[in-house]
Image: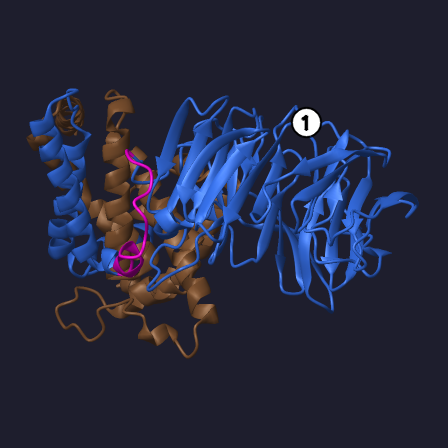
Chain colours: A blue, B brown
Amino acid sequence: MKRGVQAALLAVHVPDELEAQRRTWAVVRGAYAEREPVPRGSRGLRLVVALAVVAALVAAALSPPGRSVRGWIQDRVAGQEDAEPALVRLPAGGRLLVVSEQGPWIVRPDGSKRLLGGYDDASFSPNGLYVLVTDERRVLALEPDGDPRWSLSRPSPVAEARWAPSPGFRVAYREGNTLRVVVGDGTGDRLLAENVASVAPAWLPVEGRTALAYADTNGRIHVVEADTGQRLWSASPGAAPEQLVWSSDGARLLVLTPGSRHPLYRAGGRPAGTLETPPGLDVLDVAFAPGTRDVAYAAFDPEAGRSVVVLEAERLQEVEGRLDDVVFSPDGRWLVTGWPEADQLLFLRLPGVSRIVAVSDVRREFDPGARGATEFPRIAAWCCPAAQ
Amino acid sequence: MAGAVRDERAWVRGAQAGSASDFEALFRAHWPRAYRAAYLVVHDAAGAEDVAQEAFLAAVRALDRFDAGRPFGPWLHRIVVNRAIDWARARALRREVGAGEAIEDVPAVERGDPSAPLPEDVVGALASLSPDHRAVIVLRYVLEYTPGEIARMLELPRGTVNSRLRRGLDALQGVLGPAEER
């Protein structure tokens, strides 16, 4: 039987093999020529390399897999120079969670990646051992290879499931305008709060604690003890919250609002100042640098059509188009942001952006085989120091 | 066999040193099996070309870091099969949400090709499995890795590999069993 299987599979007619080989060789040969060392100042060699890159891109665009991406190439901005042609490794280890139109992907340190399935949203468990996803009316905990560990079905659409900090015995998620909590093994599902706004809940990131911040439909924020339902404190930030973010030590809660003043609160609920962003700019994402109370944000100027990433008062990167995400590496030494107009991911080495690693062709990486334009993927998380 | 291994190591070292002819020899030696493996997982010629092409591009990018003392094939095949699984999963999802696209529309098999050495049932039986199961079958019977090696390549428990092999063989048995008895 086994010999029969082998013989049968080796005898299967594989269509278009020689033509595919010819086309692929044209692309790969160009890429190989590109990798040859280029002496500094040698304009002639640089020209040869540039021509090789162009030849490789043309060959790729003419090959069947390349045809699907030609449309959006024509619309994009130039992007960062010297970009890597693909995501071949993460600059700081850990695992990246990226959500594309196809669903969430896990990217490993060597750049290999795995599509977990056709889910809408994703977040890591505290140590990156599982991924929480939502799928219409289901919440699922997945193994890193996409196999479901448990799932929970609800009558109404669910969203934004988040795992409590280590040891990870609780999961919170929204169902419609309610907030629910379930034990980390998928059992014991129960209602925690009603009249909840469409904002992801945020667990206080302190080991062993089960305090949860959420926003209600009146624009107030609440921090509650998830096991008892006891309200620890509430506050009114003055504008409808869009994002709730704790510093990694749990000492500050930042409430992102639509305006230019974003309140900060201490763990006990007392005000701790505000984050002020330039008026007129839309803040698209915000994060605390790990181990610090420094805030980074990406903001888009709709009039100028430009974006900036700022860490504290320092402008880290400014580009034409949007910068969608602000996600720190687990060790805080890198910040990654998505640049849809250039179809690039930008990894910024901190402090001071001493280095930029740009990765091109991101849509195609996370939507293989797509035909036509696709959404630029969202960087959901970068986890965890131990997950190598 | 030992000679082939020596050749391959020499090609890798030559390619690392900038020899285009050595790199071409490496490419031509590995293309047929890489493309076949990709095709048997994704069941789409353009998709298989996409997957194999990306794997070789990844090889180019990592060439300088590659240890020439290690075999090149397993490293390449790991990329091919993992990308093929992702490609097949992505297409399956697209088909789920696509209006009216039936599986028959996908050119999975060269249907009606009288020169095909085997009936389409073999590929059809393989197509009845999930991409993950097809990948394990292809790694075992086309690329000839052991279950332990497959487990390491796909980062799966050994028991999972064995169960996927069993299920795959069960699916293929209906097609190949009678032929084997002859």
Q: Residue at x 36, y 36 (%)?
A: A358
Position of residue A318 relative to residue A322, above or below, is above
What secondary structure is found at the residue carrying circle 1?
loop
Q: Position of residue A134 (x, y in %)?
A: 63, 57
Q: Main secondary structure of the magenta part?
A: loop
- In what quadrant of the picture does the C terminus of chain B appear? bottom left
Q: Residue at x 54, y 44 (%)?
A: A299
Q: Residue furthest bottom?
A: B100
Q: Position of residue B58 (x, y in %)?
A: 28, 37
Q: Position of residue B11 (x, y in %)?
A: 14, 27
The kind of residue on which mark 1 rests is: Arg
Q: Residue at x 37, y 48 (%)?
A: A343
Magenta residue span: A68-82
| Residue on which disc 1 sits | A293
Q: Is residue B86 left or right of residue B107?
A: right
Q: Position of residue A245 (x, y in %)?
A: 69, 40
Inspect the magenta stretch and tell me whether residue A161 lies in it: no
| Total numbered labels | 1
Quadrant of the image occupied by residue A268: top right
Q: Residue at x 68, y 66 (%)?
A: A157
Front residue of A283 and B182: A283
Q: Is residue A302 left or right of residue B51?
A: right
